[in-house]
Amino acid sequence: MKQASEFADAELRVFDRRRVSADDGIRSVYFIGICGTGMGSLAGLFRAAGYEVSGSDANAYPPMSTRLRDAGIQLFEGYRASNMDHKPDLVVVGNACTPQHAEATRARDEGMAQLSFPEAFAEFFIRDRRSMVVAGTHGKTTTSGLLAHTFSSAGLDPTYLVGGVLCNGDTSFHVGGGQHCIVEGDEYDSAYFDKRPKFMLYRPDVAVVTSMEFDHADIYDDWEDYQNAFRRFVRLLPESGRLVLNTDSEPVARLAKHTRAPVTTYGLVGNPDVRAREIVVDAAGVSFDLVDRGVVVSRMTLPATGRHNLANALSVAAVGLSEGLEPDAIRDAFAAFRGLKRRQEIIGDISGVLVLDDFAHHPTAVSVTIAGVRERWPTRRLIAVFEPRSNSSRRKVFEQQYVNAFKEAHQAVIAEPPFRHNDRPDDFMDIGAICTSLRAAGVGTHSAPNQAELRHYLADEMQPGDIVLIMSNGGFGGLHEWVLSELTARS
């Protein structure tokens, strides 16, 4: 019998996969790549629903590893076929798992039941609930989190799965008793055996599209290919559903032509169905009149800043109003919203230095994050520290966009990404070119080839009155904890 290593990679992506449903008496569920943000949250959701849950990951580090163990989930560090000796009833395969993966190989060779992340969520948790999917290049995590918080605050007890941790309740998931199911709809692919975008599997009844801009250059051929994914997504909506579109983005607005569902528009410019006026930004956040089809329905306050967060709030208000929520219920929920961890999250204010953590990695996300921080703290010097970690963020196509994104920072500190097996030399980001352009634009810039150099530079650079904004979609080598420790030692 041929071993997995003897097959071409493409051959291993297509096989007779045994699937299961929630009605098949499943008791034990195993996750390959359990410490990813989405996978860990889905594992927690299964555990909360009463299943026996275990899983493995190559990098099992806090806070996810701690959260999993606290939930009673068995966690294996490192990938080994023997981790699955207990023969789980279902294996959930993360999209970071390759066909040659030791555990994927065992699951495939032994005919274990396997589902991708979105298949598992849809089959076991969406089921007969009213599915509300938040999609878009940017803003989907904050928007889905605010939507989940708003419906929970209104007493509707939704089931939800969000790609970040809500500060209200310190969780990213909930198994609810209500009729709604809220999920962040990612356009990235599902698994090595299923290259469909995740959001295609979430059976949407209500969908929000916050923004569209070319991303994930590692899986989409070009801008047209990327747009087609969203067009296919909105075609899934039934006539009884609802599509909520941000008309500040022309590509998003054009999606109205591709759906059977009624459309509600929102935005900050023009005259969409749901909009804001009399906007006031101060240290407490942003206050505004919520306008629904020309009528002011309530005065709102959101404890967040940045035009992007205001737009996110308008989308949630549009969904809430279309689903029958009273304006006062939306107002109360917004006022109590404490945001999501890693979204302009204040993680320390030590020795006169304010330290923020943000998940931003796409250049537009970096840009709006920096703009929001400058708006909220206009007199403080901003040191923006960035790790281009995702497959897409390391591409040459985004070099000039990163230059533009960092121009509003006083200092830009960029970690040099290591070259990975799936990187192409002719398409790999040139950090030196970005830094040269930023210096020419008058931005203080430093590139760091490793953690030691990065920490040495920041130790010398951080001064009282500064803001240190750390942006990464990963752990950044423990940089957050080091910065807090370094500043604590000074005090």
Image (cartoon, grey):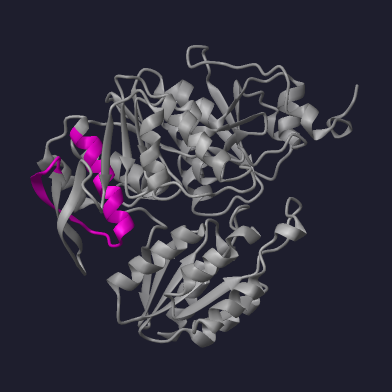
Residue 371 sits in quarter:
bottom left
Which quadrant does the C terminus fall into? bottom left
Asked whether residue 305 is drawn in magenta, I would say yes
Q: Nearer the viewer, residue 162 or 373?
A: 373
The answer to whether residue 49 of the structure is visible from this angle is no
Above/below status of 453 relative to 26 = below
Point out the stretch of residues depicted in magenta: 292-321
Residue farthest along the top direction in this orientation: 24
Residue 178 sits in quarter:
top left
Q: Residue at x 52, y 35 (%)?
A: 228
Residue 49 sits in quarter:
top left
Residue 302 is situated, as x and y percent measured from the top left of the image, at 21, 55
Above/below status of 377 relative to 334 = below
Residue 41 is situated, as x and y percent measured from the top left of the image, at 46, 40
Q: Residue at x 51, y 13 (%)?
A: 25
Above/below status of 260 relative to 389 = above
* Relative horizontal placement of residue 284, taking residue 29 as reference (left or right): left
Q: Residue at x 39, y 38 (%)?
A: 254
Residue 85 is situated, as x and y percent measured from the top left of the image, at 70, 28
Asked whether residue 443 is drawn in magenta, I would say no
* Relative horizontal placement of residue 197, taking residue 124 as reference (left or right): right
